[in-house]
Amino acid sequence: MQRDDFPCTCLKTMEKLISSSYKERPFPETYIFPPDARPGKLAVPLCNNIPVIDLGGGAEEASESDDRRTYILEQILKASQEFGFFQEFFEELPAEDKASLYSEDPNKSCRLFTSSSTGNYDGEDVHIWRDCLKHPCHPLEECKHVWPQKPIRYGELVGACSTQVRELASNILELIGEGLGVGAGYFRDELSQQMLLSVNYYPPCPEPSLTLGLPKHCDPNLITILLQGDVNGLQVFKDGEWIGVEPLPHALVVNVGYQLQIISNGKLKSAEHRAVTNSSEARISAGFFVMPSNDCLIEPAAALINASNPQLYKGFQYKDFFLNFGTKLGKTEQVLDRFKLQARLAS
Ligand SMILES: O=C(O)CCC(=O)C(=O)O
Ligand SMILES: [Fe+2]
């Protein structure tokens, strides 16, 4: 882009943001999913058996390390309540400020975009009903400078939130490492080196049964911590049907990503999920994606392979998985094919 085109060209491209334009036109056909992928009926059962882990439990046996845990928990709860800064970003930030962040270049480290993250809006078969702000959020000091400078509280609040979520994710990964029997430190360092924040904004949609905020997928990374505000919209595919994951006050959603499924040699499974829209209110969700470094070698942990548990997946570099994932949007059944060793066993 020529410098003197800016911000004119950028503002023009920004018109694609669904949050700038959804009120002004009849429902755009380019957002209508093929019948078999549409959400269809809007009232899905709400899930009442998703495990809820109470990190603050057992207060009567509190020790000093429990105090630390409680402190972290309080910070996380605070973070999950303070959705205001994301709202401010999407609803109140002047278009000129958003224009400087808008980009369709998937390699730009901090960017605002619309629909899928492939950077190929014009080539998409169907657009999805969301705008998204994405940037790295760990290590904080190395990435903070690329974040939005406005609203002015953004850096401070998202910085505090990222630090706390990172700590929570590390704790959860230690527990998973212990639980799997590979050791509490297994996921430290390279396997969890990066963390990306993806803030989804789903404006109210006049036709929620025809379109999606996010098509079905499993997360490509190791583990995701999701703050989903207080508006329904997240659904998980379980026992052959879509069920709603009700936002619980003070709760975060933890998603097992493909890498955890592969490293655990299939002991842990990443769950298929999607986001639907609604006609009355905007929904915001913020996903913190803990992921390996790009060059990290991913393979099932040796300790989990034996005669009765043969190795299900090949070794590969994370960046190869991620590239392949980008080409398989909405085709969850194909994502793992290239990485399976025994097609009949691995799912
Ligand atoms: O908006 C949601 O609740 C889901 C977000 C999600 O699945 C993702 O960003 O990968
Ligand atoms: Fe997801």
Image: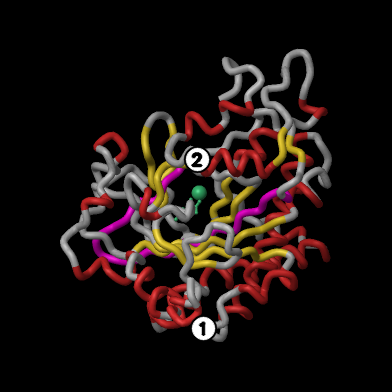
Q: Which residue is mark 2?
A: 327
- Image quarter (top left, top right, bottom left or bottom right) of the C terminus: top right
Q: Which residue is depicted at the point 67% across and 74% down? A: 144
Q: Amino acid at mark 2?
A: Thr
Q: Residue 340: x percent and y percent?
A: 63, 24
User: Within 10 Å of the Cα at label 2, are there few (<14), some (14-19), or many (20+) other Cα atoms?
Assistant: few
Mark 2 secondary-structure assignment: loop
Residue at 37%, 39% (x, y): give it: 242
Q: Magenta residues? A: 272-293
Q: Secondary structure at mark 1?
A: loop
Task: Let me know if residue 248 appears in the view.
Answer: yes
Q: Quadrant of residue 55?
A: bottom right
Point 38% across, 70% down: residue: 14
Q: Which labelled disc corresponds to residue 173?
A: none
Q: Which mark is residue 151?
A: 1
Depth-wise, is mark 2 or mark 1 nearer the camera? 2
Total marks shown come to 2
Q: Is residue 226 left or right of residue 124?
A: right
Is residue 279 one of those drawn in magenta? Answer: yes
Q: Nearer the viewer, residue 97 or 52?
A: 97
Q: Could one spot residue 256 in this view of the protein?
A: no
Does any atom of ligand 1 lie closer than 8 Å to the CB of label 1? no
Give the residue type at disc 1: Pro
Q: Are marks 2 and 1 in contact (CB under 8 Å)?
A: no
Horizontally, residue 209 falls left or right of residue 343, namely left
- The alpha-carbon separation of the residues under discs 2 and 1 comes to 34 Å
Q: Nearer the viewer, residue 194 or 304?
A: 194
Dividing the picture into quadrants, the one containing residue 331 is: top left
Are there few (<14), some (14-19), or many (20+) residues within 10 Å of tag 1?
Answer: some
Percent coordinates x, y for residue 62 in the rendering:
77, 62
Q: Could you tell which of marks 2 and 1 lies nearer the N-terminus? A: 1
